[in-house]
Image (tube, rainbow, N blue to C red):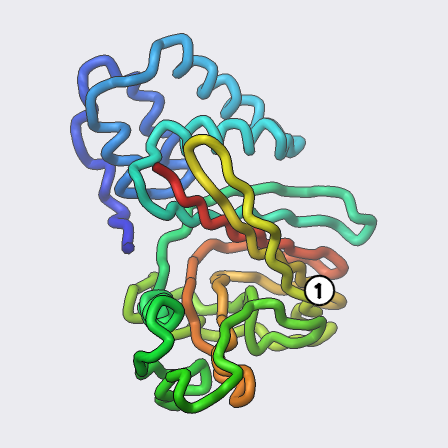
């Protein structure tokens, strides 16, 4: 789902504090946010003031990830609309392991092959035609392999799948098939750590699962402009397909690391 950069050029509903527009803009543009912001007010002035206070704390010079996470959860919990809400949180650590930055952001795009992979998961007898990350069209079907499955748990130094980072600056589009320009594994770029998937967690209103990976810059520094997730399907052939792509600039200085945690939040 693509977000329009002008999505908040609307008149807020009566009772909405205009400062909320600035607050929501900090987290990016999102249709569900727009619906919540422009719809019938359903938060009290006291709750709104609490959200704004958390944002003020999170905006101080020294990062307060717990506070920013609290802000993010308050907003997220207010616009659950019965769908899968993907978002990612990125942590920047220095060479000593001290946290420099923590930024949650709503994901702008499940790209087209997320749907293709879901089709194959839900109907293993079907055949799905998708272009892999190398540009070759593949027919993914259980009939062609006895080892048909999908995973994102790439090992150390393997940037062919799992969470990946890139330098491309094109806007996200559902038609994307991979990152625009992937960052290679290496000491002068990013040393890719292993990618992991967390156990799903279920609550009264939502269930979540996470995908986590860390990349460390050895020398020179690098600017990350895009990130996403590649899935490995049909392990015997090792085909990789892009399923998520997001833009956001992060400067990784020499010796620093970036940890990207994608969360898929299934809400009622």
Residue 83 lies in quadrant: top left
Location of the N terminus by quadrant is bottom left
Q: Residue at x 55, y 33 (%)?
A: 69
Disc count in the image? 1
Q: Is residue 205 left or right of residue 192?
A: left
Q: Position of residue 103 (x, y in %)?
A: 55, 42
Q: Residue at x 26, y 42 (%)?
A: 31
- Residue 57 position (above or below residue 197): above
Q: Between residue 124 and residue 201, name the one nearer to us.
A: 124
Q: Between residue 40 and residue 12, name the one nearer to us.
A: 40
Q: Residue at x 64, y 64 (%)?
A: 195
Location of the C terminus by quadrant is top left
Q: Residue at x 20, y 21 (%)?
A: 40
Q: Position of residue 208 (x, y in %)?
A: 50, 45
Residue 121 lies in quadrant: bottom left
Q: Secondary structure at mark 1?
A: loop
- Residue 255 position (above or below residue 135): above
- Residue 14 position (above or below residue 5): above
Q: Is residue 79 left or right of residue 242?
A: left
Question: Which residue, as the protein is rendered here, is positioned at the far right?
Answer: 96
Q: Is residue 221 left or right of residue 104?
A: right
Q: Position of residue 256 (x, y in %)?
A: 72, 56
Q: Is residue 55 left or right of residue 157?
A: left
Neighbor class of circle 1 (other Cα within 10 Å; few <14, some 14-19, many 20+) is: many
Q: Position of residue 162 (x, y in %)?
A: 56, 68
In this figure, which residue is indicated by the disc labeled 1?
Answer: 217
């Amino acid at each position: 789902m693509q977000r329009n950069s002008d999505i908040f050029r609307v008149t807020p509903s009566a009772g909405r504090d205009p400062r909320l527009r600035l607050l929501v803009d900090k987290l990016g543009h999102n249709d569900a946010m727009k619906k919540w912001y422009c719809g019938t007010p359903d938060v009290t002035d006291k709750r709104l003031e609490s959200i704004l206070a958390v944002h003020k704390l999170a905006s101080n010079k020294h990062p307060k990830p717990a506070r920013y996470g609290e802000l993010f959860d308050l907003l997220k919990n207010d616009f659950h609309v019965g769908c899968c809400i993907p978002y990612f949180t990125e942590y920047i650590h220095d060479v000593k392991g001290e946290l420099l930055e923590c930024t949650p952001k709503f994901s702008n795009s499940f790209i087209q092959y997320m749907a293709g992979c879901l089709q194959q998961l839900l109907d293993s007898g079907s055949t799905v035609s998708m272009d892999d990350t190398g540009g070759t069209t593949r027919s993914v079907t259980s009939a062609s392999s006895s080892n048909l499955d999908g995973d994102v748990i790439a090992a150390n130094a393997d940037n062919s799948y799992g969470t990946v980072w890139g330098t491309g600056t094109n806007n996200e589009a559902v038609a994307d098939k991979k990152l625009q320009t992937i960052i290679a594994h290496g000491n002068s770029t990013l040393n890719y750590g292993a990618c992991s998937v967390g156990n799903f967690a279920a609550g009264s209103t939502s269930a979540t699962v996470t995908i986590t990976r860390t990349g460390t810059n050895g020398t020179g520094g690098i600017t990350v402009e895009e990130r996403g997730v590649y899935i490995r399907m049909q392990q015997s052939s090792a085909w990789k397909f892009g399923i998520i792509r997001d833009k956001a600039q992060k400067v990784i200085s020499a010796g620093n690391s970036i940890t990207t945690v994608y969360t898929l939040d299934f809400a009622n």
